[in-house]
Image (cartoon, coloured by chain):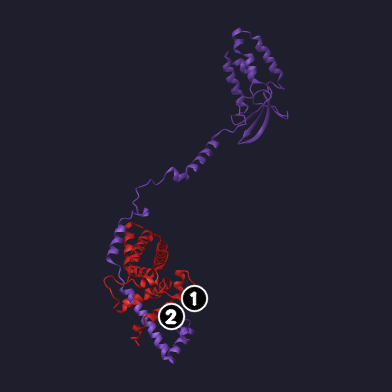
Chain colours: A purple, B red
């Protein structure tokens, strides 16, 4: 019985009693003077223990030793003064060495020319199919019927000029005529369905006749004629 | 946290808790010299890790947890060296808890101190936390990792024994 009451007293002094247990303890104190005395003694014991705590002092030499030990400690890392740093570096922009290398590799890869696709040729050869494009859209597909470069070279080649053999040019001119599909103008290019002929192509033989003896000039004239066929550097010539 | 802030916070903690933590160490360990060392170690640790404390409402709990760990380490060290705990039979013959300069247990406080030394360490710890710090049984259970009923039993037995030891003093208040 006393043990139970003492347990209640201890729990009461340390906030461990339910309301029901508290009522039980107070009833016991009212009905039994010994229980009241016991409770009072426990309260006194608690007061004595707190007096012991209050009388406990940290020895002065312990405090001084502690201060010395703290002063001897190195300054913690997070409180160390930090010098000025650059605000932005390539590392900040790209996030690190590997990221920078990856970005550089991607850029180089994108700048490399695409292999496997032949570069567009600005010169049309015979039997070439010429796709006339407008803003990346093929508008007309045509086939070159006469190799203008070969014709020009054969008619007014440097060797011919030098030898003065003009008969060669006449023969070639005749051959050029045989390549015509009709009309007065030589047809260099025609549409693949053979229904429509090119009309905006100048006579190569005429160009040969009107141009000077220099084959280079003839060649340039021929190229300019080809340009009149609306072949530009954007057009693709398929061999 | 700057060095100045760290020192300011440390000084505030020290001013508030120095005696409480020293009393805890002293009565849990039962050895004044060991308590001095452990007390210093506690505050060194507090100084080093004060920046990690976020919730200042749990400051006391944090401090006593550090103190408890340090005391346990010290007790293990003692146990390793002497292969025994600080025991009643040892402390009975040694006035190690007595304030320096007082050779005899003449007054009541010294008598209570002597009585405390008669208790086993785990009883002393529960009693110190309950009586010195005013912790509830539940809070002591959380701090020590013991069950609530275990804490209740420890305090009850400690008080019962202390009550018996200090009966002459307590009877004077009847």
Residue that numbered label 2 is attached to: A10
Q: Is residue A86 above or below residue B140?
A: above
Q: Is residue A153 above or below residue A115?
A: above
- Of the numbered discs in the image, which one, if any, rests on residue A179? none
Q: Secondary structure at mark 1?
A: helix
Parent chain of label 2: A
Q: Quadrant of residue A161?
A: top right
Q: Quadrant of the C terminus of chain B?
A: bottom left
Q: Quadrant of residue B109?
A: bottom left
- Asked whether the viewer can see residue A203, the reply is no
**Residue at 44% from the left image edge and 42% from the top image edge:** A90
Q: CA distance from mark 1 to mark 2?
A: 12 Å
Q: Nearer the viewer, residue B3 or B140?
A: B140
Residue that numbered label 1 is attached to: B149
- In the image, taking residue B173 as reference, residue A140 lies left or right, namely right
Q: Is residue A224 above or below residue A55?
A: above
Q: Nearer the viewer, residue A16 or A229?
A: A16
**Residue at 45% from the left image edge and 44% from the top image edge:** A91
């Amino acid at each position: 019985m006393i043990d139970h009451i003492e347990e209640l007293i201890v729990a009461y002094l340390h906030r461990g009693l339910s309301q029901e247990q508290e009522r039980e303890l107070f009833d016991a104190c009212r009905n039994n003077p010994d229980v009241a005395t016991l409770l009072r003694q426990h309260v006194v014991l608690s007061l004595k223990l707190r007096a012991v705590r209050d009388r406990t002092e940290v020895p002065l030499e312990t405090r001084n030793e502690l201060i010395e030990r703290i002063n001897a400690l190195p300054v913690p890392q997070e409180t160390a003064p930090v010098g000025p740093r650059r605000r932005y570096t390539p590392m900040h922009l790209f996030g690190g060495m590997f990221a920078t290398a990856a970005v550089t590799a991607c850029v180089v890869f994108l700048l490399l020319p695409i292999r496997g696709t032949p570069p567009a040729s600005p010169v049309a050869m015979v039997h070439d199919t010429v796709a006339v494009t407008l803003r990346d859209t093929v508008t007309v597909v045509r086939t070159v019927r006469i190799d203008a470069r070969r014709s020009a070279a054969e008619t007014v080649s440097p060797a011919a000029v030098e030898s003065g053999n003009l008969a060669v040019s006449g023969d070639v001119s005749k051959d050029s005529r045989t390549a015509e599909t009709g009309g007065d103008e030589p047809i260099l290019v025609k549409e693949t369905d053979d229904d429509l002929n090119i009309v905006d192509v100048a006579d190569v033989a005429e160009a040969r006749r009107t141009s000077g003896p220099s084959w280079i000039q003839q060649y340039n004239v021929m190229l300019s004629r080809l340009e009149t066929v609306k072949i530009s550097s954007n057009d693709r010539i398929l061999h | 946290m700057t060095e100045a802030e760290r020192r300011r916070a440390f000084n505030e903690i020290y001013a508030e808790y120095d005696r409480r933590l020293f009393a805890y160490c002293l009565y849990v360990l039962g050895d004044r010299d060991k308590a001095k060392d452990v007390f210093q170690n506690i505050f060194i640790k507090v100084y080093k890790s004060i920046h990690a404390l976020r919730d200042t409402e749990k400051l006391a709990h944090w401090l006593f947890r550090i103190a408890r760990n340090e005391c346990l380490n010290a007790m293990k060290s003692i146990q390793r060296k002497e292969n025994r705990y600080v025991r009643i039979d040892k402390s009975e013959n040694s006035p190690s808890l007595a304030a320096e300069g007082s050779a005899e247990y003449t007054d009541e406080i010294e008598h209570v101190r002597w009585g405390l030394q008669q208790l086993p360490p785990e009883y002393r710890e529960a009693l110190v936390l309950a009586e010195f710090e005013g912790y509830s049984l539940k809070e002591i259970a959380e701090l020590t990792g013991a069950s609530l009923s275990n804490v209740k039993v420890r305090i009850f037995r400690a008080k019962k024994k202390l009550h018996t030891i200090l009966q002459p003093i307590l009877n004077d208040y009847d």
